[in-house]
Image (cartoon, grey):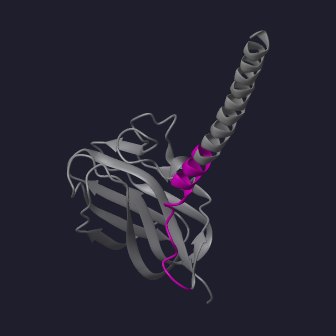
Amino acid sequence: MRKIIFEHITLACHCRTLEKWAMRIFQLHWMAWAFFTLFFSVHAETSPSPGKGFRLCRVENITSSIQPNIDASRYGLNRLLDGILPKNGWRSTWTAWYQVDPVITFDLGRECRVGAIRLFFQAMARDDELKSVEVAVSKEGQEFHLFNEYGEIVTSVETGTWVELNLQSVRARYFQLKPHFQGWGHQWGEVEFWELQGK
């Protein structure tokens, strides 16, 4: 009887050891899955190339006539150039202007032939909240000339959306974006300038 009890206890202890190893392996697999899920959820939504012959243009500096007025110290202008997209809904990492229309100036560092500007934004109060976006350009950064105004932008509320502003081919170093809101204001996540390759 003692021998049977001893063997039973030994076997039970052995099972507990196996259970610990199995739990540890499960935890490691879960952590790996969580890491890759988080990584790809952050990076998978970046804007695809507009097509053959385009390359993403680097932005050297960004300024605004009105600084973001909600959590600006944490979610400032540089968030628009970090390549990381906010999640849907409030708050995430959206760069926000509440009830104001800023004029945002981008310095590309050199003269580029830009074919498209991509803006990742989120409407908050209504699906047509981003009423329009004016694009102005300059070669020296002092005097800006209005190139075009883009409107009829409709999307789902509280859903991050890419909108493309087609410039065809505009050669300049400085670009200004002036959005107009109707509703809550502006929540932006990323701005991309796509340069045409070649001459």
* x, y percent for residue 69: 39, 37
Rendered location of residue 33, percent (x, y): 60, 47
Q: Nearer the viewer, residue 32 or 59?
A: 32
Q: Is residue 134 left or right of residue 72?
A: left
Q: Is residue 127 above or below residue 79?
A: below
> Where the C terminus falls, by quadrant?
bottom right
Asked if residue 178 lies left or right of residue 19, the reply is left
Q: Is residue 43 magenta?
A: yes
Instruction: Judge whether residue 79 can be spotted in this image.
Output: yes
> In the rendering, at what x and y percent does residue 63 appear?
51, 51
Left/right placement of residue 177 relative to residue 74 reads: left
Furthest residue toward bottom? 199
Q: At 72% from the left edge and 19% from the top edge, which residue is drawn?
A: 8
* x then y, percent, for residue 134: 33, 65
Residue lying farthest front? Answer: 1
Tell me the magenta residue range: 34-52
The reply to whether residue 142 is in sight is no
User: Residue at coordinates 56% horizontally, 77% vertically from top-left?
Assistant: 195
The residue that appears at 46% across and 75% down in the rendered structure is 116
Quadrant assignment, res 28:
top right
Q: Nearer the viewer, residue 125 or 2?
A: 2
Is residue 68 positioned above or below 135 on the image? above
> What residue appears at the point 52 percent right and 75 percent down from the top-left corner?
49
Q: How many numbered circles are shown? A: 0
Quadrant location of the N terminus? top right
